[in-house]
Every structure is written in structure tokens, then in C-alpha cells.
């Protein structure tokens, strides 16, 4: 069954987890444009995407805005509580949610959702807790691969992709 909501962490999933600093002390993040297609595919199917990240940086908000992601939560300390609140708002259960995360702060939510995943370069103790581990590393298309796996498992990947050819 397709999820009714897809939640994603950012650092270590959409980025390589690195923090890049300019000489002036500004922080930069590197995103893969491949992951944007995952959002587009989900939007085509009417499945909302929510970003939940512990970081509180406008870089992530700017990426969310560019991709027209309505639900973007920055500085999240308790992802389970935030996910439950969003599920109440959308009138769905955590069983109807897919989540991709990569580290300790993601584990509680990874354990509760209907479908969980992590990137290839995630620590082993996280990988052991999820249903799917991407071949891609975080920052190199892991989110898109996760979305494509969801769509493939539900028999809608080819039809969805063909709409953009």
C-alpha cells in the first residue's frame, strides 16, 4: 500500500551530512537535484512530503520552498511528537507513513512508521531497524531511490515516471 505521507530527515539523507563553512562563517549544504524528482513523483500521486530536521537553518527552508514542500519542520527535537501532530492534522496513522532517516535521533520514528528506510552510509545499528537500505549514500540520491522503491513495490513507478518522459 502506498503511504499517505512521506517524512524525510535532511542531514545525512538529502545531504552528505557535512557542514561546509565559508571564510565568513556562513554554513552551506550540498543537495542532490536527483532527490527533487522523488518529491515530484510523490506530488504527482497526491502524497505529501514532510521534512523534519533537527537543524534550524534557512538553507533547508529554501530547498523546501523551491520544491513546494508544504510541511517543513526545522529544529525538531522530538520527531515522533511532530509526526503524530502532523498525522492528526492529516487524519492518518503512523502506520500510513513512510520515513527515511539516518541517525540516532531518527530511530524512535523509524521504529513506529509503516515503512522505514535509511541511506547506505547509515550506522549499522540504524540499518538493522529499517525495512529498506538504499544503495545510494545520503546526499547522492538516497531520497529519490527510497521513493522509487516505494512506487515500484506498489506497481506505480513506471506509470509515474512515464508522465515525465
Image (tube, rainbow, N blue to C red):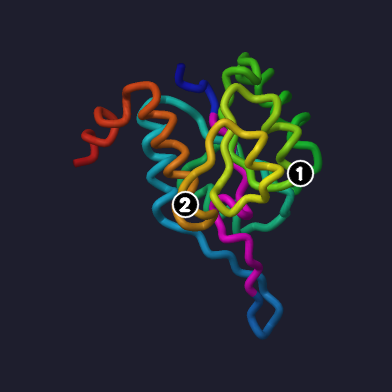
Q: Disc 2 designates what residue? A: 136
Using the rendered view, name the quadrant where residue 86 is placed. Answer: top right
What residue appears at the point 42 percent right and 48 percent down from the top-left corner?
36
In this view, 104 is above or below 117: below
Measured Cα–Cα span from mark 2 to mark 1 = 21 Å
In this view, 107 is above or below 123: above
Identify which residue, 137 or 6, lies in the foreground: 137
Q: Which mark is residue 61?
A: none
What residue appears at the point 50 percent right and 30 percent down from the top-left corner?
48
Secondary structure under tag 2 reads loop
Q: Earlier in the sequence, mark 2 or mark 1?
A: 1
Q: Residue 78 location, x and y as percent?
A: 80, 37
Label 2 crowd (10 A; few <14 / some 14-19 / many >=20)? some
What residue appears at the point 68 percent right and 58 percent down from the top-left corner?
57
Using the rendered view, name the quadrant where residue 71 is placed. Answer: top right
What residue appears at the point 68 percent right and 83 percent down from the top-left corner?
24
Q: Residue 133 location, x and y as percent?
A: 53, 41
- 155 displayed left or right of 50: left
- 72 displayed left or right of 147: right
Q: Disc 1 designates what residue? A: 105
Asked if residue 153 lies in the magenta stretch, the reply is no
The residue stretch that appears in magenta: 6-20
Identify which residue, 115 or 126, lies in the foreground: 126
Asked if residue 8 lies in the magenta stretch, the reply is yes
Secondary structure under tag 1 reads helix
Amino acid at each position: 500500500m502506498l503511504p499517505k505521507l512521506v517524512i524525510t530527515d535532511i542531514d545525512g539523507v538529502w545531504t552528505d551530512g557535512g557542514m561546509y563553512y565559508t571564510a565568513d562563517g556562513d554554513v552551506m549544504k550540498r543537495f542532490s537535484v536527483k532527490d527533487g524528482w522523488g518529491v515530484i513523483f510523490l506530488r504527482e500521486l497526491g502524497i505529501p512530503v514532510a521534512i523534519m530536521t533537527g537543524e534550524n537553518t534557512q538553507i533547508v527552508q529554501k530547498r523546501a520552498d523551491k520544491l513546494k514542500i508544504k510541511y517543513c519542520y526545522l529544529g525538531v527535537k522530538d520527531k515522533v511528537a511532530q509526526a503524530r501532530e502532523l498525522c492528526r492534522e492529516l487524519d492518518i496513522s503512523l502506520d500510513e507513513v513512510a520515513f527515511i532517516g539516518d541517525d540516532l535521533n531518527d530511530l524512535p520514528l523509524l521504529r513506529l512508521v509503516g515503512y522505514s528506510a535509511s541511506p547506505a552510509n547509515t550506522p549499522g545499528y540504524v540499518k538493522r531497524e529499517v525495512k529498506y537500505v538504499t544503495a545510494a549514500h545520503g546526499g547522492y540520491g538516497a531520497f529519490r531511490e527510497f521513493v522509487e522503491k516505494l512506487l515500484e513495490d506498489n506497481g506505480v513507478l513506471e506509470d509515474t515516471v512515464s508522465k515525465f518522459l
